[in-house]
Image (cartoon, rainbow, N blue to C red):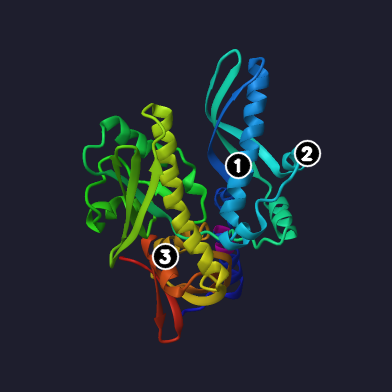
Amino acid sequence: MQATPLAALAAFAFAALCALAPSPASAQARDNVYAVAGVHVDETAANAAAAQQAGFAAAQRLGFERLVRRLSVPDELAARGVPQIDSAQLERLVLSVDVEEERRSATRYIGRLTVRFDPTGVRTLLRGQGLAVVDTRTSPVLVVPATAGDVAPETAALWRQVWVEGGFGDELVPLTTAPDGVGGAPAWDAAAGAAQAASAASALFATLRVQGSTATAALVEVDANARRDRGEVTARLTGNDAAAVRAALSSLAEQASARLQNEWKARIATGGGQRARISASALYANQGQWERIKQALEGAAQTLISEIRIEAVGREGALVSFSFVGDPAQLSSDLSRRGVRLAQGANGWELRANGR
């Protein structure tokens, strides 16, 4: 590594450090763990204003329960239950209620809302109740809502809709829905392009089948190297109207998400997602490659890594360190999707931009 003069080195290091400092958008993305989107409410009251107020109050309560389940280890939550708090306590935990979609009448309010909670307040409350808090995110998974058999077109469209509107993108394992046109039998070749665009390491094909009053979804996860059968989830159809079908399909999506979320939380709870610190030489031939490395690190700061520090900078390389959760193979995969290769070199870990 060719050294720069001391003054230039200091200036370069300061500029590089500023460039890698989490931007407001990156910080907001990490805080999205404490935002619960896709909360559906349907409330009736004496007038429109009272119905809306009831809808917002219901969304806060439903959002809090979903957030507790998101952040808690299932066995602990089963033993202790969701903390019971009064309306005043809940209000103090809520930062905002944002409207995604709404319909009103003189006495009724129907809405899909996002409720944002105070991370510090929620963590303090849960830990005070004896619940461990797991709020570390991992890489996204692309969801492909497919169908099998003679599923009606309107049901297939609704199956996709419950994934798009379900708020699954803010989970610890963020789930992003594949665009129209991605489908068919589970295969990485069919999903690879959309997965790469979403920075997803794998794709979960959720294939819907409806037989009589039972809806099932077969779950198969694929990536570049493997195929994994994740079993089936099942829900009962309590009627043939759109509301009953939506409720059943929403239940399937929530069950499918829970399998991925709980597996990740189990890894964290048993040390599989334990945080470690790594030092690496970022090697580059030009400013463009250095920019790509910085962008990849900042992108990964939304999922696996944190506390990025630049220890030294030269004309052809820099020494960087950061904390990460998971294992080095997962970290390497995440950075690879962002155009950067992490590998062991002769003198330790090295970061290089892919291509020229």
The crowd level at tag 2 (other Cα within 10 Å; few <14, some 14-19, many 20+) is few
23 above or below 324?
Answer: above
Range of the magenta residues?
15-19
Q: Quadrant of residue 228?
A: bottom left
Circles 2, 3 touching at the beta carbon (< 8 Å): no
Q: Amino acid at mark 1?
A: Gly
- Which residue does the image show at 59% across and 33% down from the upper left? 98
Please say whether residue 101 is visible from this viewpoint: yes
Q: Residue furthest right?
A: 88
Q: Amino acid at mark 2?
A: Ala
Quadrant of the frame with the C terminus? bottom left
Q: Quadrant of residue 208?
A: top left
Q: Nearer the viewer, mark 2 or mark 3?
A: 2
Residue that label 2 marks: 88
- Which residue does the image show at 60% across and 40% down from the upper left? 62
* Dominant SS type (magenta): helix
Residue 145, horizontal then vertical, whole percent: 32, 44
- SS at circle 2: helix
Residue 318, horizontal then vertical, whole percent: 50, 73
The crowd level at tag 1 (other Cα within 10 Å; few <14, some 14-19, many 20+) is many
Q: Is residue 163 left or right of residue 157?
A: right
Residue that label 1 marks: 63
Which label sits on residue 253? none
